[in-house]
Image (cartoon, rainbow, N blue to C red):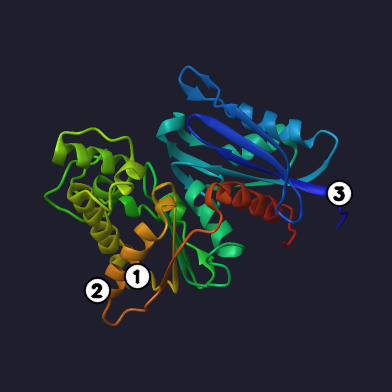
Amino acid sequence: MAADQHVVAVDVGGTSIKAALVDRDLRAVEVLREPTRRIGGVADVGQIGELVNRLSEGHTVVGAGVAVPGIVDDDLGLVRAAVNLGWVDVALRDQVSAATGVPLLVRHDVRTGGLAEFTVGAGKGAADALFMPVGTGIAAAVQVDGRMLGAAGYAGEIGHVVVDPGGAVCGCGMRGCLETLAAAPAFARRYKERTGHAITDAAGVAGLLDTDPDAQAVWTDAVNALATALLSAVTLFGPSVIVLGGGVAEAGEALVGPVRIELLSRLKFQRRPEVVRAALGQDAGRVGAALLGWQAANVEV
């Protein structure tokens, strides 16, 4: 393979789209970031093709990978639904490939991050692994026997496992989902409910853990909720490693340590996984999309 060959990695979000020209060593050679362009409130698919074409100018681009939020059929490259993009049944792979002439793969953003963590990150070498970013929402990428579970886009919605049946109503319409206790907005909301004092985010709650019993209670509830959901996941899928990522996991061992202890204390006959912090942080989406690009080009990295 010529040394000058590259792929384009695209990470699509509701507010911005990040795209990077990436080399064989998964290094970003050039990076573009733009606000997500909308037409009538719907994200413009054409913007993705434009970014791929701009990054391809003057370079030999052999593939592309696109990470997208929502319900994504990885095999078909079909976005069944992406609420924050306004997409329903968008044949993203076919449309972008037609606009660029570049072979590409499309995958759910969390499964893309999981691919990165399982390939070159904290879960490297584990055939059975689970990646769970804890941020504005919570989802999971699950790999069993070296194969990522997709279920036509419906796998991995661990944020909507019910951990508190009598709890708050979730944005999905169910009551007591994991996200109502452990997603990033829940920390500030629940702290204000307890104290009447506003706090910005989960990091603000984490900063009070040494001195504030209310912050400690909110944090403990989140840890217990995460352990409850992960107990089900371990029982069902048997991961040897659980990788915690996302903005809330930026608290490091303040989150990962208690979740590890609480989960392991509940296990009986199940496999006892390592519980570790994600290694790639904000780069997981780019690295995973680049890996998809090399897969689309049938090149191993």
Distance, label 3 to label 2, CA atoms, is 51 Å
Q: How crowded is mark 2: few (under 14 residues within 10 Å), some or many (20 or more)?
A: few
- Name the amino acid type tagged 2: Arg
- Picture residue at 21% right of the left edge, 54% below the top: 221
10 Å crowding of disc 3: few (<14), some (14-19), many (20+): few
Q: Who is closer to the viewer here, 148 or 250? A: 250
- Under circle 3, the secondary element is loop
Q: Which amino acid does label 3 sit on?
A: Asp
Seen in the image, is 19 located left or right of residue 196?
A: right
Q: Residue 4 carries which label?
A: 3
Residue 243 x %, y %: 45, 62
Is 173 left, or right, of 8 in this rendering?
Answer: left
Q: Tell me residue 250's x, y (percent).
A: 44, 51
3 and 2 marks in contact (CB < 8 Å): no
* Residue 115 image position (x, y, % from top left): 56, 58
Q: Report which quarter residue 29 is drawn in.
A: top right
Q: In which quarter of the image is the C terminus?
A: bottom right
Query: Is residue 162 at all visible to an observer of this figure?
Result: no
Name, please, the residue furthest toward the bottom. 269
Q: Which residue is drawn at 86% across and 49% down?
A: 4
Q: Residue at position x 53%, y 72% from top?
A: 126
Where is mark 2, residue-wise? Answer: 266
Is the C-beta separation of discs 1 and 2 under 8 Å? no
Q: In this view, does 80 lie above or below 99?
A: below
Q: Mark 1 — residue?
A: 234
What is the spatial separation of the Cα atoms under label 1 and label 2, in whole angstroms?
11 Å
Q: Residue 38 carries which label?
A: none
- Up-down relation of residue 148 to residue 175 (above or below): below
Among numbered discs 1 and 2, the one appearing first in the sequence: 1
The spot of residue 100 in percent (x, y) is: 73, 35
